[in-house]
Image (cartoon, rainbow, N blue to C red):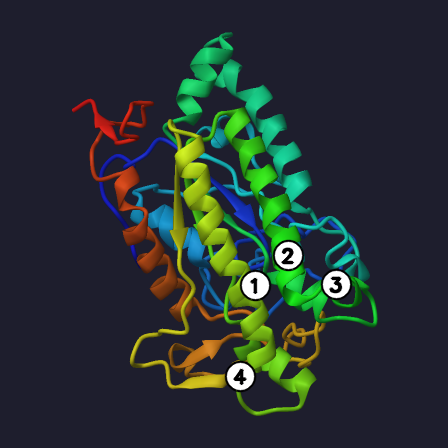
């Protein structure tokens, strides 16, 4: 177990994203993107919780490394003072675009995750012990926000022409531009709500998932899918740099995607569990016995990584986010050079 001792390095951590970060928000939704059944959670202390993994996901690992003694609660189940450490709003199937994954049923899009965050903010003043909007925003400025969106806008939208028209309406370049433009507005909405420290995950190498390879009928990474996603990531990185220049009192850190993995992981093209390798139906079959050597597998099901990869990716992300916690009291202030000012 990765556990950090002492007080958390930041007071709160808010999580936005898709199934890579979801820790139970989809459990109560009418959706196919729901995994609150075995063998999911086989290596998690509480069993199947709605995490799309055999154990912890990337957000769980980041929270542990930040020093929280409990996992950040899901919005669906968070109670009272629990929200003071942050909330996880992520939802399996969620996208930047509202229609993404609608063929699977209910999901909480990025826009709706932002709405849920506003509900949380309304609850904070009483818990903090203040009626001041300014004091509430000062509290939020100390929190880390991570956002991981875009994956489903490709595998559960653009590359699913039987359900969506986007691939006929947009070239890959134009689609990336439309996505990033909308994403930028969403991130600025979070900024307006008080967020200042952002860690933004790049979309993954989706063409290398067993589900996508099966759909395309190949045994190696699908270059056309990866190329489209890399257009999105490149434009997203540029846009985050622009936001850093425009919003002087905020910091946006880009968290790169990678197929890098621990040396013990040597199975990278096959799921650990028995799963239907089709888009939207890549979940583990309920109650089937998964592989026993899970530490050697990159993929848990047809689209989602194992806990071993979650730990590896979460540790890398935590290190990338270090500007937000290396000083015990970091204040992002507006100055001529747009530098950090430390109040230690």
Q: Quadrant of the C terminus?
A: top left
Residues at marks 2 and 1, CA–CA distance in whole angstroms:
8 Å
Q: Is residue 312 left or right of residue 49?
A: left
Residue at image mark 1: 52
Q: Secondary structure at mark 3?
A: loop
Q: Quadrant of the N terminus?
A: bottom left
Residues at marks 1 and 4, CA–CA distance in whole angstroms:
22 Å
Mark found first going from the N terminus, 2 or 1:
1
The reply to whether callout 3 and callout 4 are in contact (CB within 8 Å) is no
Q: Is residue 237 left or right of residue 77?
A: left
Q: Secondary structure at mark 1?
A: loop
Mark found first going from the N terminus, 3 or 4:
3
Q: Which mark is residue 221?
A: 4
The reply to whether callout 2 and callout 1 are in contact (CB within 8 Å) is yes
Mark found first going from the N terminus, 1 or 4:
1
Residues at marks 3 and 4, CA–CA distance in whole angstroms:
26 Å
């Amino acid at each position: 177990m990765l556990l950090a001792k002492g007080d958390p390095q930041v007071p709160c951590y808010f999580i936005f994203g898709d199934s890579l970060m979801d820790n139970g928000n989809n459990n109560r939704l009418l959706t196919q993107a729901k995994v609150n059944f075995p063998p999911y959670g086989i290596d998690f202390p509480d069993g199947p919780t709605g995490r799309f993994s055999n154990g912890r996901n990337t957000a769980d690992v980041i929270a542990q490394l930040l020093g929280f003694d409990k996992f950040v609660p899901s919005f669906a189940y968070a109670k009272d003072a629990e929200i003071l450490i942050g909330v996880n709003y992520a939802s399996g199937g969620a996208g930047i675009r509202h229609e993404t994954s609608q063929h699977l049923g209910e999901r909480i899009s990025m826009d709706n995750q932002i709405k849920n965050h506003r509900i949380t903010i309304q609850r904070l003043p009483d818990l903090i012990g203040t009626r001041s909007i300014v004091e509430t925003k000062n509290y939020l400025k100390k929190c880390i926000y991570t956002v991981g969106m875009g994956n489903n806008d490709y595998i559960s939208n653009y590359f699913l022409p039987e359900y969506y028209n986007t691939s006929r309406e947009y070239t890959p370049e134009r689609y990336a531009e439309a996505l990033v433009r909308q994403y930028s507005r969403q991130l600025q909405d979070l900024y307006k709500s008080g967020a200042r420290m952002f860690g933004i995950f790049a979309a993954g190498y989706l063409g290398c998932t067993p589900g996508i390879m099966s759909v395309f009928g190949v045994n190696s990474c699908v270059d056309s899918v990866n190329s489209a996603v890399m257009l999105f990531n490149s434009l997203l990185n540029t846009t985050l740099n622009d936001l850093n220049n425009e919003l002087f009192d905020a910091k946006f850190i880009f968290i790169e995607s990678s197929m890098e993995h621990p040396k013990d992981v040597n199975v990278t093209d096959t799921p650990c569990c028995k799963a239907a390798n089709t888009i939207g139906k890549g979940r583990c079959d309920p109650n089937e016995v998964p592989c026993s050597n899970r530490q050697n597998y990159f993929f848990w099901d047809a689209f989602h990584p194992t806990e071993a990869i979650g730990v590896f990716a979460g540790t890398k992300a935590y290190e990338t986010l270090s500007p937000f916690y290396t000083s015990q009291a970091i204040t992002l202030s507006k100055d001529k050079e747009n530098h950090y000012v430390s109040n230690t």
